[in-house]
Amino acid sequence: MRIHLDHHSGEPIYQQIVEAIKFQVARGDLTDGDQLPSVRNLANELGINMRTVVKAYDELVHAGLAVQKQGRGVFITPPQGILPKNRRRLVLVDLVQRLLSEAKRLGADSDEVVSIVEQVAKDMEPTS
Amino acid sequence: MTDLALSVSSLCRSFGSHQVLFDVKLELHRGTVCSLLGSNGAGKTTLLKLLMGLIGPTSGESTILGDNGLPRTASSLMATGCLIDGFEPPSGTRIDHLLSLSADASANFDLERANTLLAEKRLATKTVWKTLSKGQKRWTLLVMLLCRRCDLLLLDEPADGLDPESRQQLYQLIRREVNDRNMTALITTHIINDIERITDEFCILHQGRMIFQDNLEDLRDQVFAIESAEVIEFPAEVQLLRSEHGESASYWVRDPCGVLENSVLPGEIRRRGVGLEELYLAVTREAKERLERNASMRTAEVVGGVRDK
């Protein structure tokens, strides 16, 4: 699995792993039932502590993006039905609010944000 | 056996009237990589020598792998790999002879692996020591240490003289040993960007004082640089590591409870995470100024005292 880490950004490494895997799921590079690398393998490949990988996987499981199967590893869950629809809306509204307040701080209005969202969504469409 | 691979408490060391270490404390759990940072003359090498028992402390105590005696026992020395500048094999020794010496000395020595790691650098094992370049010597010594399968590695500037690719490879090898065998490594370096990748814990030694020790991943979560147009008073939960006041104010803060997380501070222009190098510079600059302030206060007291009389 290709994950690029920025060790100098100050962003927690486990967070970077979570974001990278989420991104790969969104792009369709990882799909339902795909197994994530073992904790030891990913830690060695990235040259980091195993606890950091465990923390990232825990976060993915907690967010409903992956399941831990006892003794077999961590697997990506089916994309639909992770959350009931009304709950999903709440989560998205919260994310959008955070995005917009961050944008406001940078001096961008919501139109600019919407156009970026559309552009990025287009870029993230599976390449096949 | 405890979970600590290494511990140091109230450690002081002087050379004559010159005190090099002041009340140093350090604890390191097994299975961690700790970067020991500090400028030249901070006392890093002295600390490693004390840990190995090469020199004794003026006061205080240090323990490696459960052994707090001096000199260290043979078994704790066998289980500890140490690289400190100044050790060189006799100049006429061939590499393969060095390797077989290591293999004779330690049953754990992985000769096959050593040969592979040397061959990767196209180092012929029949080469004589004095004909090696500085970087090749360094690599050979490191390979000999890594193939001993130690429980604890103490490395003083191991990256010194290595090319960037070898540095990366070295750190990756160390990380693997730590992940796979629960080894522990304490590494001093000046090249912070390289080591940041594999670091779990780091500590900063400044003028003989341990001014910082922490878990790097926690810090990535908690430390920010904040730039502001106004002077900010931070809540008590927030630890102010350093502030600089120029055209705008810059603050390096640590927010362990997350109280700043969802708020924009008055006058705040920018907030960003901080890498290890920047944090190191901020913390050492702060410590340096604090020491200077203390010194000038002491001078002022003395001058004041003289005037009073």
Image (tube, rainbow, N blue to C red):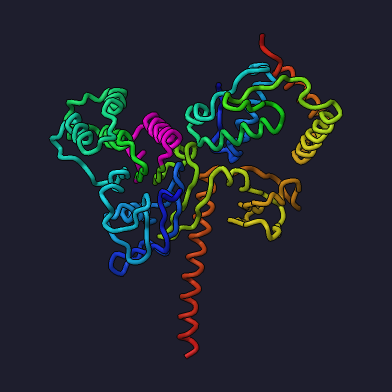
Residue B274 sits above or below residue A122 on the image: below
How far across and how far down the image is residue B68, in percent?
34, 57
For residue A7, side relative to residue B23 (left or right): right
Which residue is pictured at 31% across the width and 69% down the height? B17
Q: Quadrant of residue B146?
A: top left
Q: Position of residue A31 (x, y in %)?
A: 67, 17
Residue B233 to residue B275: above or below:
below
Count of number-bearing discs: 0
Is the stretch drawn in magenta largely helix, strand or loop? helix
Q: The C terminus of chain A is located in which quarter?
A: top right
In the rendered image, residue B52, in percent from the top left (x then y), is placed at 31, 52
Can you say whether A74 is above or below B41 in the image?
Answer: above
Q: Quadrant of the N terminus of chain A?
A: top right
Residue located 52% across and 44% down the image: B276
Question: Horizontal placement of B243 versus A115: left or right?
Answer: left
Residue sitting at x 62%, y 55%: B246
x and y percent of residue B265 in the render? 74, 51
Instruction: Indicate whether residue B154 is drawn in magenta.
Output: no
Outermost residue toward the right in this view: A86
User: Eyeballing the image, is B63 above or below B168?
Assistant: below
The residue lying furthest to the left in this view is B92
Left or right position of B55 against A61: left
Stretch of the chain drawn in magenta: B156-183
Residue B203 visible in the snapshot: yes
Q: Decide which of B294, B49 is in the foreground and name it.
A: B49
Tell me if residue B135 can be seen: no
Left or right: residue A72 versus residue A105 is left
The quadrant where residue A87 appears:
top right
Which residue in the rendered view is the most extreme toward the top?
A128
Q: Magenta span has B174? A: yes
